[in-house]
Image: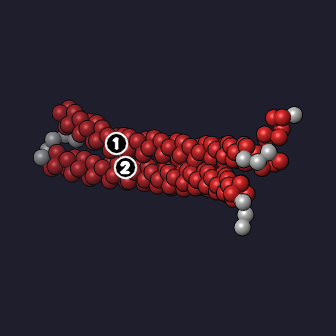
């Protein structure tokens, strides 16, 4: 049977190795989690960019629809004025047509502006998601680095304990020199 000092030395070495390995594994898990969070945030950013593009396309389609409807209404308005015997393109009829065209153009531009505002908000959200992803990745990498330092400290502490208990020829022998 081994003597108690040998058992204590083996236990100290094993404990040191387990502590260092645990610290390294914890750091690697944190780095992996940081990368996973970054990938999730990147996915969210891409979705928001696609939604921004879709918002612009939808606003463009609604704007064009508004302009088509305006042309149709203005045509009907001109026909009604002509049928009523009111001179089209002169006097009050011209004022009504111009006012209708201005309002219709403002409506079309408002639709376009609203789509652009929505797209801009989505793009800002995409940039924010990317930033949060980079932060998560950096945090994971920093935790991994810290775990390596912790593992190194565990090894040094274990080596010191091992030496004090008589390992490495015993530190007490070195102190006598």
Dot 1 falls on a residue whose secondary structure is helix
Residue ID at (38%, 40%): 117
For this orientation, the residue located farthest to the left is: 84
Residue 98 point in image, percent of width and height: 26, 36
Q: Is residue 33 left or right of residue 112?
A: right
Q: Residue 160 in the image: state x and y as whole percent.
A: 72, 43
Q: Nearer the viewer, residue 7 or 65?
A: 7
Report x, y in % for residue 126: 48, 46
**To which residue does mark 2 refer?**
59
| Towards the viewer: 15 or 152 | 15
Whole-angstrom CA distance, mark 1 to mark 2, is 8 Å
Which labelled disc corresponds to residue 41? Answer: none
Q: Quadrant of the C terminus?
A: top right
Which residue is at the front of the view, 34 or 56? 34
Q: Secondary structure at mark 2?
A: helix
Q: Is residue 125 left or right of residue 89?
A: right
Quarter where residue 15 is shown: bottom right
Front-most of residues 86 and 151: 151
- Residue 94 in view (yes/no): no
> In which quadrant of the rendered image does the N terminus lie?
bottom right
Q: Residue at x 76, y 45 (%)?
A: 163
Q: Is residue 118 visible?
A: yes
Residue 170 placement (x, y as % from top left): 79, 45
Q: Do the residues bearing badges 1 and 2 touch, measured as CB atoms within 8 Å?
A: yes
Q: Which mark is residue 114?
A: 1
């Amino acid at each position: 049977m081994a003597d108690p000092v040998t058992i204590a030395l083996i236990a100290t070495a094993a404990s040191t190795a387990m502590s260092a390995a645990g610290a390294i594994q914890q750091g690697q898990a944190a780095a992996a989690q940081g990368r996973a969070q970054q990938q999730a945030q990147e996915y969210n950013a891409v979705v928001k960019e696609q939604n921004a593009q879709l918002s612009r396309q939808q606003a463009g389609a609604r704007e064009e629809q508004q302009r088509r409807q305006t042309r149709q209404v203005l045509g009907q308005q001109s026909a009604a004025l002509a049928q009523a015997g009111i001179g089209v393109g002169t006097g009050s009829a011209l004022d009504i047509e111009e006012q209708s065209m201005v309002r219709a153009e403002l409506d079309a531009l408002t639709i376009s502006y609203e789509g652009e505002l929505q797209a801009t908000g989505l793009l800002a959200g995409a940039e924010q998601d990317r930033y949060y992803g980079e932060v998560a990745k950096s945090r994971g990498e920093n935790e991994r680095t810290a775990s390596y330092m912790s593992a190194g400290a565990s090894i040094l502490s274990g080596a010191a304990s091992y030496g004090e208990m008589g390992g490495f020829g015993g530190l007490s022998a070195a102190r006598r020199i």
